[in-house]
Amino acid sequence: MDISPNAVLGFARAIIADPRASAREIILSRPPMNARWLGLALVVVLSVIFGQISIRLMMTPSGMMGAMLSGPATSILVQAGVLLLMAVAMQQVGAMFGGGGNFPDAMLLVSCLQGVMILIQVVQIVALMLLPPLAGIVSLVGFGVFLWVLTGFVAEMHGFKSLLSVFGMILVSAFAIAFLLALLLAMAGVTPPQAR
C-alpha cells in the first residue's frame, strides 16, 4: 500500500469527490480484520495528537469537557469509543431500514472517513497558526464534508439508492443517539459545566 503524502491526498480527494465509488473500492479491497482494527487504532491516535495540538492553540478548555479533552489517555478512549459507536450505528440503523451492510465494513469506512477529517484538522491547525478567523470556516467546511462523505458511505455500504433519504436517516439517528446519551448522562448524575 502506498502511504506517501501524494497517495494519501489523492485518496482523500477521491473520497470527497465521489464517496459512493470510493466506498465501493474500499469495501472490495477486503483487508483482514486485524488490519481494520489497526487502521482504526491509527486514526484514533492521529486524531488525538492533532486534537491536542488544536487545544493548545486555542483557549484552554475548562470544567468536565476540559478534563476530558486535555488528557491524551482519556482522549484516546473517548475517540475510540466515538468511532466504534459510529460504526455500530452505521451498521445497525442501516439494517433497520433494510440495508445489507456489516460491522467490519462499517468500521473500515469510519476509519477512512476519520482519515479525511484528520487532513481537514491539519488544515485547521495551520489556519489557527496563520489566520485564526479562517479556522472557523475550515470547521464549517469540514462538517459539510463529514456529512457528505458519511451519506455516500452509508448509501453504498447498505445498497440504498437515495442519498437524500440516507441523509435524513443520518440526521434523525444522530438526534436520537444524542438524546439517548444525554438522558443516560443525566440519569448517571453527570451535568455539563456551568458557565461563569
Image: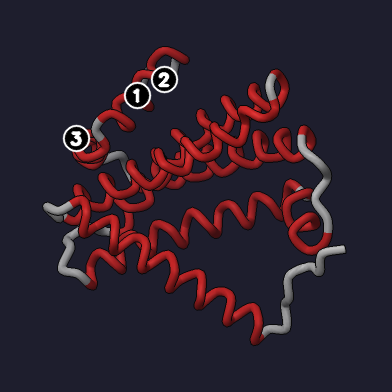
Mark 1 is surrounded, within 10 Å at the Cα level, by few (under 14), some (14 to 19) or many (20 or more) other residues, namely some
Please identify the residue farthest to the bottom as the structure is shown: 187
Q: Residue at x 29, y 26 (%)?
A: 14
Residue 130 versus residue 84: which sits nearer the camera? 130
Task: Tell me the element at label 3.
Answer: helix
Name the quarter where the N terminus is drawn.
top left
Residue to which mark 1 is pinned: 13
Residue type (three-letter) at the residue carrying disc 2: Leu
Q: Secondary structure at mark 1?
A: helix
The residue under the point 74% across, 46% down is 72
Q: In the rendered view, tell whether residue 164 sits above or below residue 173.
A: above
Q: Position of residue 39 (x, y in %)?
A: 45, 39
Instruction: Say the numbered circle drawn on residue 21.
Output: 3
Which residue is rendered at x = 70% and y = 28% of the image? 132
Where is residue 45? Give x, y as percent: 61, 40
Would you name the residue on which mark 2 appears? 9
Give the class, few, some or many, for how many residues have Cα within 10 Å of label 2's Cα (few <14, many ≥20): some
